[in-house]
Image (tube, grey):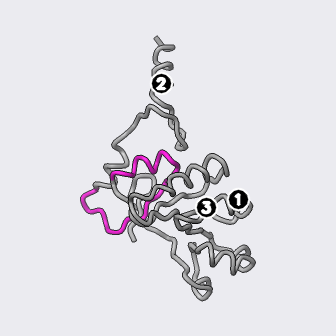
Amino acid sequence: MPLLKDGLPTEDPWRFAESEEDLDREGPVFVTLELWRSARARLAGRNAALGLRLKSDQSPEDLAEDLAHFKAIALEFPKFTDGRAYSYARILRERLGFRGELRAVGAVLRDQLAFMKRCGFDAVELEAADPSGSWTAAAREFSAWYQPASEGGQPISALRRRLQAAE
């Protein structure tokens, strides 16, 4: 599947392992929570990068001690009206201090991209290629916000204060 990372289309080196047999693959691999729990010892000793794919009903708070094992976490949007992944992204970034890649997967819409970025997502797995560049354009639509968020940008009020101080 095509990947949009930091607002730009990029080649996705990650593969998804559905079973323990898939763990023999070279390169970075995403595993399910169930696979992580059943093959934890084997996966913890793996040389290649390891990622975790969480369903919308699987809270990352249950894995706080294990987060150091993962270079990436993919949070699933089972349908575009299910916003639990937004909350999980903020929990991962703000409470649990996760600094790896946060990837949105599943039923994501272009219109949600700005909000995903604000919650801490830095990658989106697209269901189809983006030949028109509409996803890339969406990544640049907003440059200032009224509220602070996980992505670290300063809100408009802080920018105003800085401009006033410079006068």
Q: Nearer the viewer, mark 2 or mark 3?
A: 3
Q: Earlier in the sequence, mark 3 or mark 1?
A: 3
The nearer-to-camera label among 3 and 1 is 3
Marks 2 and 3 sit apart, C-alpha to C-alpha, by 33 Å
Quadrant of residue 18 within the rendered picture: bottom right
Q: Taking 1 as reference, is 161 left or right?
A: right
Q: Which mark is residue 25?
A: none
Quadrant housing residue 1? bottom left
Q: Secondary structure at mark 2?
A: helix
Tag 3 or tag 2, which sits nearer the N-term? 3
- Which residue occupies the extreme bottom position in the image? 21
Q: In this figure, which residue is indicated by the disc labeled 2?
A: 157
Tell me if 101 is positioned left or right of 10 in this view: right
Residue at 47% across, 58% down: 123
Q: Between disc 1 and disc 2, whose residue precedes? A: 1
Q: CA distance from mark 1 to mark 2?
A: 34 Å
**Which residue position holds label 1?**
64
Q: Residue 25, percent across and down?
A: 58, 83
Q: CA distance from mark 3 to mark 1?
A: 10 Å
- The residues colored magenta run 111-133
What is the crowding at mark 3: few (fewer than 14 residues within 10 Å), some, or many (at least 20)?
Answer: some
Label 3 sits on what residue type?
Ser
Viewer-nearest residue: 24 or 92: 92
* Residue type highlighted by circle 2: Ser
- Under mark 1, the amino acid is Ala
* Relative to 33, residue 68 above or below: above
Q: Is residue 147 magenta?
A: no
Residue 59, labelled with which disc? 3
